[in-house]
Image: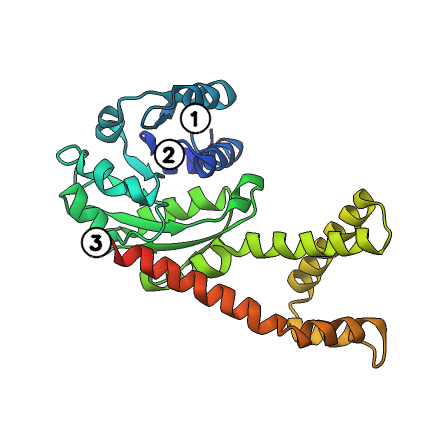
Amino acid sequence: MSNQTASITTGQIGFLGAGSIVEAMLSGILKKGLTAADRIFVTNRNNAERLEKLTDAYGVNATTDKLAVARASDILILAIKPKDAGEALLELRGTISPNQLIISVIAGVPTSLIGEWLGVDCPIIRTMPNTSSAVGLSATGLSANAFVRPEQLALATRLFEAIGTVHEVAEEELDIITGLSGSGPAYIYYLVEAMMGAGATAGLDREMARQLTLQTVIGAAHMLLETRAEPALLRRQVTSPGGTTQAGLEVLESYRFQEAVTAAILRATERAREMGAQYR
């Protein structure tokens, strides 16, 4: 293990929760060599089968004793459902020290309330990754409270870079990130569903329609990334006057496509704020 890797992984990492985001993080962290599997502990409420699966797949330690994990972890990652957060974190009162780094992937719950539930002033970093973390391509928003030291912020950034890109933002912007990139994969999947279905309806074999649709989405994303051109410019470049693309875009415009996408993201953002408000 390199000195750089050792310097960011001293101590134990504990995961409170064992869902898909946790598995994605375990995979990314271990593939990048950010720590050893025997330094990672995972716990959940009562799903022993899930814990056993993670132990078998990644060689990490699993236990149902969440208090022991909380006490021993230098970095404690909270990956529980929002509805369970209050009860679970109140149970940790008295186990968290001011030196422990708490990282939350709990949607909608502010760092101030996490600190209140834990009953201690400690460094807390709130994040919002998305489900593309499962393939190492998450877009993660990250925000730190006033107790987080620069080296802790850098460490958290490295952890989430193991599953994609990381963008530090103000905490109030995390709700927007939830609506845009947190929920965003579902919007893309919805578009892909429609494109695949249209191809099949027009007469293509469904698997062929799937392959063509996915490559089209991948190619468009790479064009945006590599050329750094504005999407409107690329759209105009592929739209010949009176051509097929223009005909298709006119139909999308008649259905107010862009307005619908904007409304979806704003509504998801609003819902994230609503979810957070119920805890404040």
Picture layout, residue 178 above or below residue 90: below
Q: CA distance from mark 3 to mark 2?
A: 26 Å
Q: Position of residue 35 (x, y in %)?
A: 42, 30
Which part of the image, by quadrant, shows the C terminus?
Answer: bottom left
Could you tell whether 45 is left or right of 33 in the image?
Answer: left
**Front position among marks 1 and 3:** 3
Secondary structure at badge 3 equals: helix
Q: Residues within 10 Å of mark 1 (few under 14, many from 20)?
A: some
In front of the other: 210 or 1: 210
Could you tell whether 214 is left or right of 140 in the image?
Answer: right
Reading the image, the residue beneath label 2 is 9
Q: Position of residue 140 (x, y in %)?
A: 46, 52
Q: CA distance from mark 1 to mark 3?
A: 31 Å
Query: What is the number of the mark on residue 112?
Result: 3
Q: Name the residue rendered at 32%, 29% in the picture.
A: 12
Could you tell whether 115 is left or right of 144 in the image?
Answer: left
In primary-sequence order, the first of circles 1 and 3 is 1
Picture layout, residue 184 above or below residue 23: below
